[in-house]
Structure formats: structure tokens, C-alpha cells
Image (cartoon, rainbow, N blue to C red):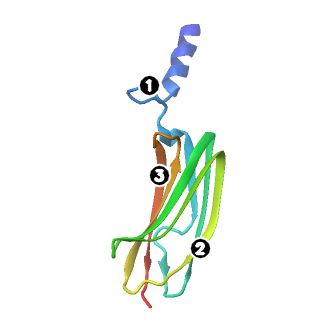
Amino acid sequence: MLLGVAVTLLAGCTRDADGDTPASSLASITIYQPTSGQTYASGDTVFADIHIQADVDLHGYQVFLINETASDTVWQVQKDAHQGVFHLDSLWINNVTDHSDMLFEVHAIIDHEGSRNSKSVTFHCHPL
């Protein structure tokens, strides 16, 4: 009976080839806004509302808004702090000059070695 419980507990723990818990299980990222597939008109406000939570203190986070059409990072935020919960509530005004496919990318930085968990959404912006 005890052996069955031990096997069940070990099977429930996910580890990589080195025996480390994968970074993706250490931090959860919720992107409330922008919404994937959304279309923004010229001058619209694109809200950035994210929540990152972990069972351990994270090293920080990075957020990028990338105009994939122009291959240009149009907005970014980085926070270097040791805590288990982060919340970002910010905005960017759509000022693109061409129809643009946008990538909103969030990275939860797990440690100083660069382990991270990432999540992203895509949307479209109309020009001026």
C-alpha cells in the first residue's frame, strides 16, 4: 500500500531530464487585455492588463508589444524584483502607419539563469 502511494506521488510530479521542475509549472501568466484577435482603429487605446503568479519568488517580468508587420518593438516594460505576484495595468495608443499584425508577449522571469515562462496574444491595428 505504501509503495502504491509513493508511486502515485512520484508520477504526479513533472520534471525535465535534469530533474528540475519545468519553468512553466512555476509561474502562471494571465493576459486579461489585449484580447487575442481584437482589431484596434487608429487612435484606440490598447490596454495591457496582466497578472503573473508563482509559488516561488520570481526574478521579474518582461512585456513586449511587437509590430510584426514592421518588425519593430513599439512598447516594452521590464520589472526586476523578487516577489511571487506581479500585476501590470498600462496602455499604448495605436499610432501605426500601416495595417499591422501585433504580438503582445509576456515573459515571467523565474531566476537569474534566464528560466522563464511565456505567454502571448496577437491582434491587428489599423493605420492612421
The reply to whether residue 92 is in sight is yes
Looking at the rendered structure, the secondary structure element under dot 1 is: loop
CA distance separating discs 2 and 1? 40 Å
**How crowded is the residue under tag 2: few (<14 C-alpha within 10 Å), some, or many (20+)?**
some
**In the shown orientation, is residue 99 left or right of residue 106?**
left
Between residue 43 and residue 37, name the one nearer to us: 43
Identify the residue under disc 1.
19
| Residue labelled with disc 3 | 118
Q: Earlier in the sequence, mark 2 or mark 1?
A: 1
Write the residue at 53% across / 87% down.
43
Could you say which is closer to the camera, residue 2 or residue 97?
A: 97
The residue that disc 2 covers is 91
Image quadrant in which the C terminus is located: bottom left
> Quadrant location of residue 5?
top right
Apparent side of residue 67 relative to residue 3 in the rendered image (left or right): left
Question: Callout 1 environment at 10 Å: few (<14), some (14 to 19), or many (20+)?
Answer: few
Sequence-earlier tag: 1 or 3: 1
* Mark 3 residue element: strand
Q: Residue at x 54, y 69 (%)?
A: 34
Q: Amino acid at mark 2?
A: Leu
Disc 3 marks a residue whose amino acid type is: Ser
